[in-house]
Image (cartoon, rainbow, N blue to C red):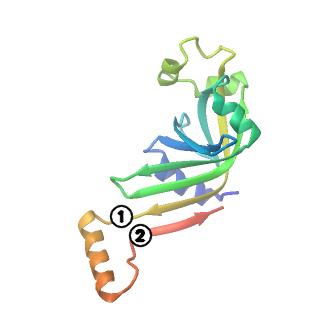
Amino acid sequence: MLSKDETAKLWKMIEPVGTGMLANWNGDFLQSRPMQLVQDEFNGSLYFFTHRSDTKVDEILHNREVNVAFSDPSKKTFVSVSGVATLVTDQSTIDTYWNDVVSAWFPEGKNSQDVALLKIDTYLAQYWDSPSSKLVQLFKITKANIKDETPNMGENKKLG
């Protein structure tokens, strides 16, 4: 379980990215696919729309352990979120997160029996955050190589 401060830190890093790579076990190997966040705040759970009929839904229902990775290379920010996925078919929850962007993927509308949400309840997260510019990073790497040390490239922390 993540603390309130930890969820706030994660949301600050993943909200601007918006799209995460959802990885799950498909029965033979790990598979990843891009998924767009649909929420405006984060309380420890991530929400993504999906078609109930999609293969990933069956895969995830057989093995609910998933990972979602977010990356913003321009800011040197990387986040890995591990959690347990559930399928949400409750119409009021679908209504809460429905928007014009989502409707493009579901032309049959939000009341279609094929519309669902994947809810990922986070139990562990890790992030890497390097506020330095490329020039500063290059300097740190060069200095570390000269001194035979490991460069300090920013903050890395496990949460949960």
> Residue 119's image quarter?
top right
Placement of the C terminus among the 4 image quadrants: bottom right
> Which mark sits nearer the N-terminus, 2 or 1?
1
Give the amino acid at mark 1: Pro
Residue 116 versus residue 7: which sits nearer the camera?
A: 116
> Callout 2: few (<14), some (14-19), or many (20+) C-alpha neighbours within 10 Å?
few
What's the CA distance linking mark 2 and mark 1?
7 Å
* Percent x, y of residue 127: 51, 60
* Percent x, y of residue 62: 76, 39
Give the amino acid at mark 2: Gly
Residue 158 versus residue 34: which sits nearer the camera?
A: 34
Q: Residue at x 55, y 17 (%)?
A: 106
The residue positioned farthest toward the right in the image shown: 62
Where does label 1 land, which residue? 131
> Residue 89's image quarter?
top right
Placement of the N terminus among the 4 image quadrants: bottom right
135, above or below 22, in the image: below
Residue 26 versus residue 97: which sits nearer the camera?
A: 26
> Residue 32's image quarter?
top right
The residue positioned farthest toward the front in the image shown: 28
Q: Residue at x 61, y 17 (%)?
A: 110
Q: Residue at x 70, y 38 (%)?
A: 60
The residue positioned farthest toward the left in the image shown: 135
Where does label 2 land, which residue? 154
Query: Given contact means CB atoms under 8 Å apart, are the residues at marks 2 and 1 in contact?
Result: yes
Residue 153 versus residue 38: which sits nearer the camera?
A: 153
- Identify the element where label 2 is drawn: loop
- Identify the element where label 1 is drawn: loop
* Percent x, y of residue 125: 60, 58
11 relative position to 133: left or right: right
* Percent x, y of residue 39: 56, 36
The residue positioned farthest toward the top in the image shown: 108
